[in-house]
Image: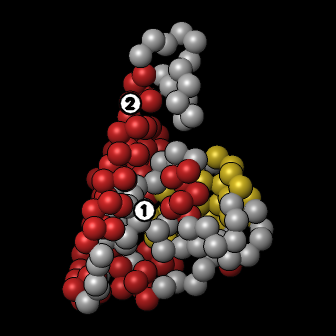
Amino acid sequence: MQITINNHQYEANQGDRLLDVARVNHEHIGYFCGGNSICQTCYVKVLEGAELLSALSEEEKAILSENLIKAGTRMACLTTVEKPGTIRVVSAVEEVRNLLETNPLGLGSYAAVMGWEALVKVPDTLRLQAGREFDLWQLLTDVIGGIGDAWKLVFSAFCGCSSSGEKNAATVC
């Protein structure tokens, strides 16, 4: 199956989480909590192929506002590829980057909208998170892994290494 994340095309298999496809391919999607649906940094907007993805989970309904859902927003850590076809998504992080490059004055209104949409769901989100049981060791492992992955990307960006760890010929790390 073809999946396009932030205008880059990848292969995905049935059952793959959007977040995992992004992480394996070093794509720009937030995942500070390691994919445990806590931090809410993995928002993606589905541009094509929403019908090929898993149905909205109860967790997503508790966290995402009606406006975000209507706009096609999903949480990459809770969304899986279910059917073959073409899927296109853009991450919230990539939307901000694009806005910064094309219309930096629009960042304030974007932040206000996203902040409001999160605020209206605070009671539902708090109820959801308060009722969850976590494997603390797994959660810590996932968070540390997410932070480690982020540092690898930062290092490779500054050092000029490719995603596979190979150095560019002109760069000495």
Residue 160: horizontal and vertical position, in percent? 48, 22
Q: Residue furthest front?
A: 137
Disc 1 secondary structure class: loop
**Residue type, numbered disc 1:** Cys
Mark drawn on residue 155: 2
Task: Kindly report which numbered mark, 1 or 2, lies closer to the viewer in this rendering.
Answer: 2
Residue 72: horizontal and vertical position, in percent? 54, 72
**Mark 1 or 2 closer to N-term?**
1
Question: Left or right of 163: which side holds 92?
Answer: left
Mark drawn on residue 154: none
Question: Left or right of 63: which side holds 11?
Answer: right
- In this view, 172 is above or below 68: above
- Residue at x 44% of width, y 29% of height: 157
Residue density around tag 2, few if under 14, some if 14–19, many if 20 or more, within 10 Å: some
- In this view, 95 is above or below 142: above
Residue 103: horizontal and vertical position, in percent? 42, 43
- Residue at x 28% of width, y 67% of height: 137
Disc 2 secondary structure class: helix
Q: Is residue 59 in view from this perspective?
A: yes
Residue 53: horizontal and vertical position, in percent? 63, 75
Observer-nearest of 27 and 132: 132
- Residue at x 25% of width, y 71% of height: 136
- Residue at x 22% of width, y 86% of height: 130
**Residue type, numbered disc 2:** Phe
Q: How many angstroms separate mark 1 from mark 2 (CA)?
A: 21 Å
Cβ atoms under marks 1 and 2 closer than 8 Å? no
Which image quarter: residue 151? top left
Count of picture labels? 2
Observer-nearest of 144 and 78: 144
Q: Is residue 67 in view from this perspective?
A: no
Q: Which residue is mark 1?
A: 42
- In this view, 4 is above or below 63: above
